Amino acid sequence: MAILEQLRMRAGTLLAVIIGLALFAFVLSDFLDSGGSLFTRSKNEIAEIAGKSIPYTEFETQVKKLEKFQQIRTGQNSFSEDIMDRFRTAVWENMVRDQILEKEYKKTGINVSEDELKEMFIGENPHQLVMQYFGDPQTGMLNRAGLVQFIQQIQEIQESDEKTYYTFVEDEVYKSRKFEKYISLLQKGFSATTLEAKRRNADNSTSVDFDFIISPFSALSDSAVVLSDVDIKKYYSDHKNNYKQKETRDIRYLYFEIIPSREDYKEAEDFITNSKEEFTKAENTRQYVNLNSSEPFDEKNYRNGELPDTLNDIMFHSEPGTVVGPYFEDNTYKLAKLAAINYLPDSVRARHILLQANQNNASLVYKTADSLKDLIVKGADFARLAQLYSSDKASAVDGGDLKWFKEGAMVQPFSDSCFFGKKGDVMVVPTQFGIHVIEITDQSKPSKRVQVGILARKVVASDATDQLYYSQANEFAGVNNTYEKFNKAVEEQKLSVYMRSATGLQPLDREITGLEYPRILVKWAYEADEKDVSGKVFKLGNKYVIGVLDKIHDEGFAPLESVKAEIEHEVRKEKKAEKIAADIRTKTASGQTLENLAANLNLPVKTAIGVRVTYPSLPEVGSEPAIAASALQLEKNTISPPLTGNNGIFVLVVTNKNTVADIPEEDLEREKIYIDRSYAARVNYTAYESLKNISRIKDNRREFY
């Protein structure tokens, strides 16, 4: 449960020389000062977007704002590094978009007025972001009266989580609306013509039937054609734009996996075995588990059938205090103890009023909560009090109603109060989100539940085991510190089974298959030189890793050598096409039928029915758009010249053409609407991408994260 679940000149005289030197010194001093400033700017610049320098501090401020917003929204105090990286990516994308589009907004005069912004929050058609962050997630509805009251309340507050939340959403709505206006303006410049509508109708309605033969490229061996360096270079030159590449790195890494030793297994087993008597006698099972176990006490009250088969029957037919084990499960030695038997409802319906509290006002907030409880017990309108006082605006609009929920759906103190209490109870309950005034409005029928305390000792590598693997990895890295030595040692020591490769690593990548948190290895790859071996051993999860930088791929065009194999395939295909086509031409006689030619070439005649340019699939062959387009241009019953397709050389004879009559006016309008929608969908994405492609964007994030 969250607090707000839905809620960026030279001279010749001595005097002239002296003056000139003085001026030069002044200019030099200014240049050096500026240079220092420039160097500092470069050092602190996280990006340059469309000519504007973005300092790291500005970027980080925006990240902190997003982090704070998500803290308020989710109730979490901190986030994992993976989540923080997602926040940084979101801020980066927003910052790039803002810098690029703001110039376009100024050119076109696009803006959003205060009245328009207000209308998007509390008008008849609220903006989708308002619905997302302030609407009821269960009903999809927005309580406008509650939102109006909420907005009025935050206007009177200097600073609060609620105001931070609202301001963040307001800014996002403002930017989103400006972009919507810009895209709408562009979309109005794209409208389907009658000619386009007729062409689309023809493409979808005109089809062709034909017989064909195909001599596949695979029928001719690779050795039948000769490739020269001139052929390779010419193809590369003619198709160079096909070989653009981003900046990437190719690495390999040798890993030493830290595996627990026999002694580590024995230590874990002995701990559990020796703890059984003490665990059995422990009066407070929860406390004992939390103090001694690898896993925290499981607060869940299990229904019959929810526990593993090894425990379920015993726990549901025993008295509290019964202990099972030791047993081994999931690389962990365990003891299980029946901690409690409870009779609880399957689900509960409750409503609450949330009062936010901190160290400075906790006692005052408690008094307020107690006063509200007294009023409710005496018959006051709970729903009205929730609308007036609750900080949880998502539920306050419904009078604090949280609908039906199961055990564990809420934070523990809240959940326990509702499931261990009874219908009609009104309670004051503190949680990590603040002070709640809770009323249980309904409960399902109680059933038997059990709580099971698991004393677990996971088998992990000891410090001694860890040190052993580190010493092995460190010694290997120290001795084999060159590319040649490294590769030779891996081969001689038969360590290739512990080698892995990661190709195409981009500057901001944070994932490498098989490694935990490998960001530091990616950063090393972008700081190292080609053929470097990492002198440092990286500890990534349960592995010690030594990296080798095999290849640096700079942004631009891929070198010929790196794409030579791909080019050879394409050139070989072209030469095969020429050779096969020439062979077919020599065997094609005037007046010859397709069947005769097929017999001469020892190829079967195939038939394709209803082929269209929008569906160019041929039976037993696959997609052949060039052949479909050619077939539509051929005369009926005329044998075609050899035609080059994706899979081989074709010869075909058109047997029938199915053409479309003049399209009715209503169908023409329908085609126009379809094309207009297609344009609109494409503009939404391609307009911004086009602006982005022509903007100069320098991304230095890898230097900071």
Image (cartoon, rainbow, N blue to C red):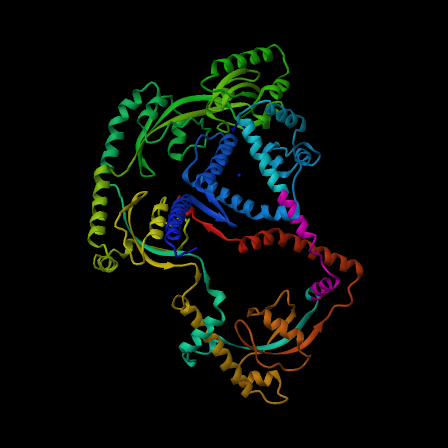
Q: 506 left or right of 659? A: left
Q: Is residue 581 visible?
A: yes
Which of the 4 image quarters holds residue 615?
A: bottom right
- State the quadrant of the C terminus: top left
Q: Position of residue 526 (x, y in %)?
A: 36, 52
Q: 112 left or right of 324? A: right
Magenta stretch holds residue 183: yes
Image: 335 above or below 675: above
Q: Which residues are magenta?
A: 178-202
Image: 280 above or below 659: above
Magenta stretch holds residue 260: no
Image: 547 above or below 150: below
Q: Position of residue 409 (x, y in %)?
A: 50, 29
Image: 372 above or below 278: above
Could you tell me which residue is drawn at 67 percent across and 31 percent down?
A: 122
Could you tell me which residue is drawn at 68 percent across and 66 percent down?
A: 203
Residue 629 versus residue 350: which sits nearer the camera? 629
Which of the 4 image quarters holds residue 400?
A: top right
Residue 444 versus residue 45: which sits nearer the camera? 45
Q: Position of residue 159 (x, y in %)?
A: 53, 25
How many circles with numbers are drawn on the protein? 0
Residue 410 versus residue 71: which sits nearer the camera? 71
Dominant secondary structure (helix, strand or loop) of the stretch shown in magenta: helix
Q: Is residue 397 visible?
A: no
Q: Position of residue 239 (x, y in %)?
A: 49, 69
